[in-house]
Image: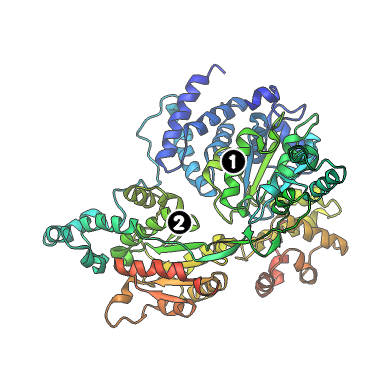
Amino acid sequence: MAEAPPMLDAAVAFGRVLRGAGLRVGTDRLVEFVRALEQLDAGKRDDVYWAGRITLTSRAEDIEIYDQAFEIFWDRGGEARTRPSSKMRLRVPQPQDSVLPPKKRVERNEAGREAVTMRYSPVEILRRKDFAAYSPEEFAELNRLLADLRVGGALRKTRRLEPSRRGRHDPRRTLRSAMRTGGEAVRHRYRRARSEPRKVVLLCDVSGSMSSYSRALLRFLHASVIAGTHLEAFSIGTRLTRITKELSTRDPDRALRQTAGAVEDISGGTRLGDAIKEFVDRWGQRGMARGAVVVILSDGWDRGDVEVLAEQMQRLSRLAYRVIWVNPLKAAPGYKPLAAGMAAALPYVDTFLSGHNFDSLEELARAIADAAGRDR
Amino acid sequence: MSETRNGRRGALPSGVSRSEDLQKRLREHDYLADTGLSTAIFLALKLGRPLFLEGEAGVGKTEVAKVLSRILDTPLIRLQCYEGIDVYQAVYEWDYARQLLHIRAAEAFGEGGDTERVEKDLYNREFLISRPLLQALEHQGPNPPVLLIDEIDRADDEFEAFLLEILSDFAVTIPELGTVRAERPPVAVLTSNRTREVHDALKRRCLYFYIEHPSFEREVEIVRLRVPQAEESLARQVAAAVSKLRTMDLYKPPGVAETLDWAEALVALGARELDEELVEATLGSVLKYHEDQQRAASAGFAALVGGGSGG
């Protein structure tokens, strides 16, 4: 135990590295880490590794990040054990200032001619303006508009019961009322299944071809996530990334920064079919997509195998209650679903919307809300 | 706090003071845990923390709780979660039928007029049915019980918040009776199949371990240990075939539980070597989806049987 103080320092420094890489490592967890080390052999690499992994990670996705951080900090760190240096860098992408498109480019495109006039553009015009033509100021305005948007699933029956005039017998309440009538259950009480919002899953394409829209759409995702409890968000590109947690920070800019940090394939290519397959395999089939309203926000450009996409869309449509596809290109005059991916996916889509401006996002929010309203 | 309550040993079984000892003890009780898992279990017992186990279905999460109850020689109390589970099914429920009879009886003996007393009598411990969580808190015995909270991802958020409370204090308040507090906190094991992300606050209360499919060698060992009638060569062939199936992109890749089912089925048929015919006859015990069976069939059973078995 003579080593205890340096161990604590090292633990704190290691915690800082992990936090920088995006793990949520609070003081409580670090204390737990040190306590765990006291029970094991802090001089053995494996013991330190497991003590940290067991106390400092809390989901499967954390493990890869933890392994990298561990290797850099403990294996290559050398004297870092006692004197951690701040020079240590992880390969995990660091959060950047903004999500797509990079701020500078937007400013270069927009700042000169339009920024000044647009600052005063009335809300009505802004609502109909294509996201691709937004200035940074208008994005700030968009946040305010989105804050008022209600996104939530339509109601569905759950297994939880609530009091009702007819339905299943409720012994608890029957007994309470029987007390008042001398033990005679004069009036029987009943309860029935409560209605709850359906789950909503949003899958947002963040590949290069979507770059003029993904920033606004991710903000829509953020507004949805913080408004609704039964909501899950993913980004799709060459791979699938779950971003519900990153988006659940209230401040939109911070949430988007965290998301940019977590999503490794921003602005890359798209493998829609593979990403949707991964979603169905890992999440959808196990329950997330069952009876849910699934929304895909993508232009349908797929560099992968289109047949995979068609097959996976079919699987998804069987699991989900409704599939909504949002394609910002749809608003263009004379749009036809020429992208092979889009054409392959359309037969399995219940509702096809545009999503290129605020009005269309409002329409999307409405579509999500009544997706199941008609026949619940 | 739990440390002082449990003494210096925590809830560790006697004779176990290092994680290696525990690993050996687990093996003696037919559970093969790798270093990571046995360290996690060791720390959970020693530090008195709930253990949160995640992983694919069938990797042996539930089994951990079962083997712990055998090692600690203490009952296993299991709470199976499902959508809509609430306090009445998880903690306690009043026995309405008996309460109603009690009111009638009081009435018959002419005590019905004293409603206040009758009501007081009604909410008495004897009319309370304890469900798993309360059972675990009230347990009396030389060792604290093992509390298995199975498939927590199936329950909903409200229930999670409630569990968080129980796992922090190991106490529960029944409005009509008062607070019930565990003398010694139960050894809590939570499992999740990840159909839903369980809330961070709950996970932060726990030690976390992600169980993966075992390596080939370990799986052979598991088969040998759990299905001793299976010969070495058969065990190796089964393990090899299963690890091939796991790479096949199936809806439900087989877990260890399926491997064992399969080995048992083969032994029951008197098999000593795996061949294509046997695979076809017993495929249902390892692949439970029709689509998966078709996929395996179209890949050819020969591929499953031949090569790579390291025989």
A272 horizontally vs B37: left or right: left
Q: Position of residue A373 (x, y in %)?
A: 50, 71
B24 sits to left or right of A209: right
Q: How many marks?
A: 2
| Numbered disc 1: secondary structure | helix
Which part of the image, by quadrant, shows the C terminus of chain A?
bottom right
Which disc number belongs to residue B164?
1
Rendered location of residue A338, percent (x, y): 36, 81
- Position of A221 with respect to A133 (left or right) is right
Image point 66% across, 65% down: which residue? A166
Which mark identifies residue B125?
A: none
Pointer 2: what residue? A228
Q: Are marks 2 and 1 on the same chain?
A: no
Q: CA distance from mark 2 to mark 1?
A: 22 Å
Crowdedness near tag 1: few (<14), some (14–19) or many (≥20) residues, C-alpha within 10 Å: some
Q: Chain of mark 1?
A: B
Residue B161 percent location from the top left of the image: 57, 44
Q: Give the left or right position of residue A308, taking residue B129 as reference.
A: left
Between B89 and A20, the one nearer to me in the picture: B89
Q: Does dot 2 land on a helix, a strand or a loop?
A: loop
